[in-house]
Amino acid sequence: MGDPIVGRVLEGRYRVVQRIARGGMSTVYSAVDQRLDREVAVKVMSASLSSDPAFADRFAREARVAARLSHVNAVSVYDQGTDGRDVFLVMELVRGRTLRDLIRERGVLSPALAVSIMEPVLGALAAAHRAGLVHRDVKPENILLSDDGGVKVADFGLARAIEADATSTRTGLMMGTVAYCPPEQIARGQADARSDVYAAGIVLFELLTGVAPYVGDSAMAVAYQHVNSDVPPPSSRQRGVPRLLDELVQRSTRREPSARPLDAGAMLAELHDVRVDLGLPVQAVPPPPDAAGGDPDRTQVINLDPAALAAVGLTAPPSPTGPPGRRVASPDRPTAPTRPGPLGDPLQRTAISERPLLGDPSRPGRAGRPGRSAKSAKPGKPPPPAAQVANAQRRRRARRRTILVVLLIVLLGIGAGTGAWWFIVGRYNQVPSVSGMAASAASTQLKADGFKLAATSPREFSETVADGQVIKTNPGAHDRVLKGKTIQLVVSKGKERFTIPDVIGQPSAQARAALAALPITPVTVLDFDPTGKYPLDRVISTNPAAGALVKRGSTLTEHISKGPPPVAVPNVINQPRATANQTLSQAGFTPVFADAFSDTVTVGDVISTNPPAASALTKFSKINVTLSKGPEMVTIPTDIKKGDNPDDAKAELEALGLQVDPKQKDRSIFDFSAYKVDSMVPAQGTSVKVGSTVILYVK
């Protein structure tokens, strides 16, 4: 069954011609852009990815980012689209093969060839890193070798779009890329420019040794080695690898990203230094086996026209294997060297065409065919007629004039081409990439390449370039500018950081004024102060803390006190004073004790609290605690004696809080004196509770 994509016209514009390659995540086709009438490559994503609308959106965003990258060694992205359920990417069509094919053909590459291939790869990655784009999937399959010897990096941004897909399987991607994944991408899912540097270091290792540094039965086994092992030097796998290349591979594949070159531009500069130190020549990418040219031992048959030869006074030489007018070379009789005639006439391409057509009659002792003296001429052969000689001379003069005209045209063409080359190309130099180099080293390299340096080098903050190293140049790296042009270096001041001031304990308005001097965004959060140290509207803490160094635009959270938090009053009724004091103190309150009489609560125990138990009260507040003194006692007065007035005695007893129950005793019916106190129960001097009843006997 044929491929359903072949023959379709995607989005009414791209006519798919044939399938070029197929992988687990996508299929690549050659196609024709019918609008611009040019050949393109169309990468159609697999159905498992295309069916997810979220993936299509991510894919479109990543394609737009990749399309902004323009570099001679990066595959250009022309367009992106969706046709039905098919999500596709339109790219530059590169006729050739991948670096993986070259590794399969040759195995181990020479250091010179490995460096010559990695330089354009790193150049493309450096341009991407300057544009803020991370490849995330550098591997030999994504490095294309065109038939004209060019090196191009493909699939910028595609790995990010696929990795972000949470619904599709990643097995194919993992198996295809884990051999080149840096530890941080495996362990934390994080990737930056230094991750591409790691993958490029693994590719360089494979070019020098023929194999990747880690192999295993599964992708997870390989991933484990990346995370837990250091990449060995290539010379441990392949003899003859120079020490400088060993060191570069190991520097670029450190497990800790901060120990690697900052980006591909920095690694490219180091690779250039290695090439210079080792004296490695630049080598062209070898052609594929089927494009290396014809067989040098193959015999070429040249047909000669006898009539045409006769017109110029020649005859075809006899051939042992064919009729006159045809010369065939054989292994036993090699063909004599040939050369074209003055105007490239195919009739002149023959072994005998190197001899002049006729002898020169002006030279004594020469007649007839050149190279044969008069003495060696066959006896009896008459000299050529005068008309034949004159015609031959005219033909020679015509050929000379033609040769001169052709030479003049060629010289004029060379001169014009040289002049055009000079004005278009020759008087320009390419600005080298010096990003990540020390300013002094960058100045030396630019001067060596014929450029002048600006008198001043502006300094800028950089999150990725260390203090004193070059961030960029003006004009930029790889720009073509006139020789001797002034180049300005932009040097890093390191990371821009601001110190958080100490505003703890300050009123919120005062703290906000202090923070306003910094280019940061303060965010206020109101919190209860559980310590009771900071009153209402005071700064409790900041995050980041005082003294921390933060980036421009960072967010700082300041926690402002709402006072102590509200706490429920614990129930301490009927508890002894010591226990109640401990309970209330642990709850964050300050108990204030007072005593009161109680007929029901044991002496020393808590009668009540104010506020009462379970009430919400601000922490660290005071709580009034009433302790029992026991029941209130009074002593029956001893000054009430027998014979006292009962009303006076009653009034005195009631004044002490006692209840009086007067009772009369019997007396004679003939006793008409006033009633007097006779006795009391309890008796005088007895201690009784307030409110007790005293029986007052009167008589």
Image (cartoon, rainbow, N blue to C red):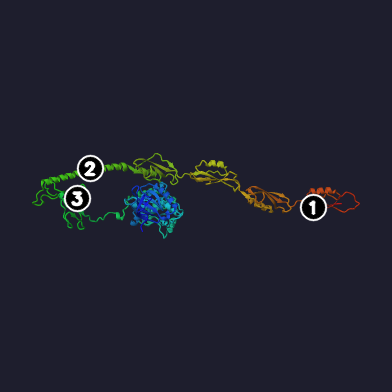
- Residue at the spot x=22%, y=44% of the render? 406
Residue 209: mark: none
Q: Amino acid at mark 3?
A: Leu
- Indicate the position of residue 219 as horizontal and vertical percent values: 42, 58
Gap between marks 3 and 2 measured at Cα: 24 Å
Q: Residue furthest right?
A: 670
Residue 118 appearing in the image: no
Element type where label 3 sits in the image: helix
Q: How many marks?
A: 3
| Left or right of 337 in this view: 72 | right
Gap between marks 2 and 1 measured at Cα: 153 Å
Q: Earlier in the sequence, mark 3 or mark 2?
A: 3
Gap between marks 3 and 1 measured at Cα: 159 Å
In the displayed structure, 170 sits above or below 429; it is below
Mark 3 neighbour density, 10 Å: few (under 14) some (14–19) many (20 or more): some
Element type where label 2 sits in the image: helix
Q: Looking at the rendering, which quadrant does residue 426 occupy? A: top left
Q: Amino acid at mark 2?
A: Leu
Q: Earlier in the sequence, mark 2 or mark 1?
A: 2
Residue 561 appearing in the image: yes
Mark 1 neighbour density, 10 Å: few (under 14) some (14–19) many (20 or more): some
| Left or right of 579 in this view: 31 | left
- Indicate the position of residue 233 as horizontal and vertical percent values: 39, 55
Residue 693: mark: 1
- Quarter of the image that includes the N terminus: bottom left
In the picture of the structure, the residue carrying the numbered disc 2 is 408
In the picture of the structure, the residue carrying the numbered disc 3 is 347
Numbered disc in front, either 3 or 1: 3
Q: Nearer the viewer, residue 32 or 592?
A: 32
- Indicate the position of residue 595 as horizontal and vertical percent values: 71, 49
Numbered disc in front, either 3 or 2: 3
